[in-house]
Amino acid sequence: MLSPPQILSTEAHEAAVIHLTIPRTEMMSAFGPAVGELMGILAEQKIEPIGAVFAHHFRITPDTFDFELGVRVGKPVAPAARVKPGELPGRKVARTVYTGPYEGLPAAWGAFDKWMTAEGCKQAESLWEVYSVGPQSTPDPTDWRTELNRPLLG
């Protein structure tokens, strides 16, 4: 289920990120360990994450995800292992919230893309998802919420 989409401007936020370029088939096996690594480095550096984990995709092909897994932070992270300073960009975006299990995200993006096309939105290549409520919050995937953000051109 999608919330009513909206167009808004976001502010840039400092983040700690891990850049990953992986086959789509490895997303489920790579994501969790990368989150653990990210949070471990933040704990070592005594940096509290702000908000939920996000995935900022730069390029998506049928076979590959090229993205940064990250979380907002209130002060810069020192580079360590794969973790480096990054940013969740400030942009004009179309946004909606998908409620349901992660397996439903492709269909949710399809419905959201259809809405953007009908509204005449010119989409940038990048996009990001913020995993507001997930397995870390509740074991019931029907309650998971993922914020979908698509930067707009013009």
Image (cartoon, rainbow, N blue to C red):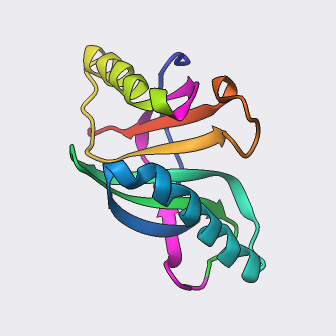
User: Seen in the image, is 21 located left or right of residue 134?
Assistant: left
In the picture, which quadrant includes the N terminus?
top right
Residue, x 56% and y 18% (percent of image)? 3
Residue 29 location in percent, x, y? 48, 55
Q: Residue at x 56, y 44 (%)?
A: 130
Q: Quadrant of the C terminus?
A: top left
In-front residue for pair 2/35: 35
Q: Quadrant of residue 78?
A: bottom right
Q: Residue at x 69, y 41 (%)?
A: 135
Q: Position of residue 22 (x, y in %)?
A: 33, 60
Q: Is residue 14 visible?
A: no
Inspect the magenta stretch and tell me whether residue 86 lies in it.
yes
Horizontal side, residue 117 vs residue 10: left or right = left
Q: Is residue 2 above or below residue 26?
A: above
The residue lying furthest to the left in this view is: 62
Q: Is residue 27 visible?
A: yes
Height in image: 35 above or below 56?
below
- In the image, the segment drawn in magenta is 78-102
Give me the residue at 53% from left, 84% from top: 81
x, y (%) of residue 133?
Answer: 68, 37
Query: Residue 83: within the magenta?
Result: yes
The picture quadrant where one finds residue 58 is bottom left
Question: Where residue 109 sits: x, y (%)?
Answer: 38, 28
Most foreground residue, 142 or 125: 142
